[in-house]
Amino acid sequence: MMESKQKKIIVVDFSGTLVKGFLVEKANLLRYKILDIPAPNDKKHKKMHATKSHYNDIKTHLEKVCGIKKNMTIKYNEIKGKQITLTGEEIETTLFTDMFKYCMYHTANLYGQKIYDKNFLLALKKIKKSGYKLAIVSGIRTDIVSGILQITNCPIKFDYIYGQDPVLSQDDNLKQIITLTKIGKIFYIIGDKMSDIKPSKKVNAKSIFVTWGHPTGNEEKFANYTISKGKELLQIIKWNHEHHPKSRRNKIR
């Protein structure tokens, strides 16, 4: 059954927005260590993470140590599903995203709720209580996102999680967000980099840039709002909520 179009949705990015940037940074460095690849310095590492250029370095390494070639065709059984064929490059991607899942789970388990900004969580909790649905849209695998929320006992239950599959075939935030518009109206999109917030224009939503993540450039110029502290989120949404005639029924306190 199709859910009501009247649902009010707020989209939150995962890495660098909901969870602090250090989580993915430490997980990436652990993956380098496991693969025995020299880790880049902090500045280069953050740039590589933002542009995803480290993917090619890891794939090149896997080709060398595992003998996988991009043009190979390898049989693969989907979980509880049919047998499909993946290319060698897709197998490489599955390998390094599986390793990333291990590293993310391990790091999240070490730090627990320290990976979150408490004030940001509190703001989201109050916003959800006022009647909004919360959705995560991320370029990270869905099982990584969902697993970390449970490993850390995240105090917020997200209504929708739209992430990646093991071969990263859905790496397009806009497509994921458009899918969400079939469920309800997206009011805000919150993220730490341009690719997170840019889809807001296509779905007529307000964009909120958070400064504590991995910006790629021009986010503050593009965004409707910029916040540097988690509690500021509540101030923005509360003001808009109280000044929108149709939103007065459920007050944010």
Image (cartoon, rainbow, N blue to C red):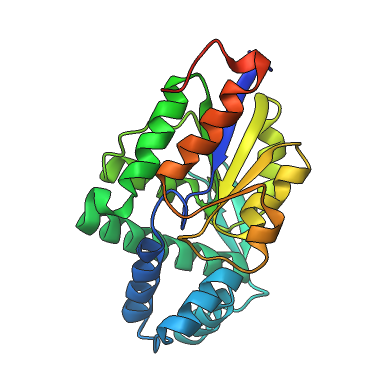
**Residue 97 on image: x %, y %:** 47, 62
Nearer-the-camera pick, 215 or 220: 220
Nearer-the-camera pick, 195 or 105: 195
Q: Quadrant of residue 102?
A: bottom left
Image quarter hosting the N terminus: top right
Q: Residue furthest right?
A: 202
Looking at the image, residue 142 lies above or below residue 216? above
Residue 94 visible within the image? yes
Query: Residue visible at 39% across and 69% down?
Result: 25
Image quarter hosting the C terminus: top left
Looking at the image, residue 179 lies above or below residue 211? above
Residue 4 visible within the image? no
Q: Residue furthest top?
A: 249
Query: Residue visible at 51% across and 65% down?
Result: 214
**Residue 117 on image: x %, y %:** 34, 49
Q: Residue furthest left?
A: 110
Looking at the image, residue 242 lies above or below residue 67? above
> How many numbered discs sit on the rendered protein?
0
Query: Residue visible at 47% across and 79% down?
Result: 45
**Residue 24 on image: x %, y %:** 40, 64
Q: Quadrant of residue 41?
A: bottom left
Using residue 36 as the reference point, say whether residue 73 is left or right of it. right
**Residue 137 on image: x %, y %:** 56, 44
Q: Quadrant of residue 162?
A: top right
Nearer-the-camera pick, 167 or 68: 167
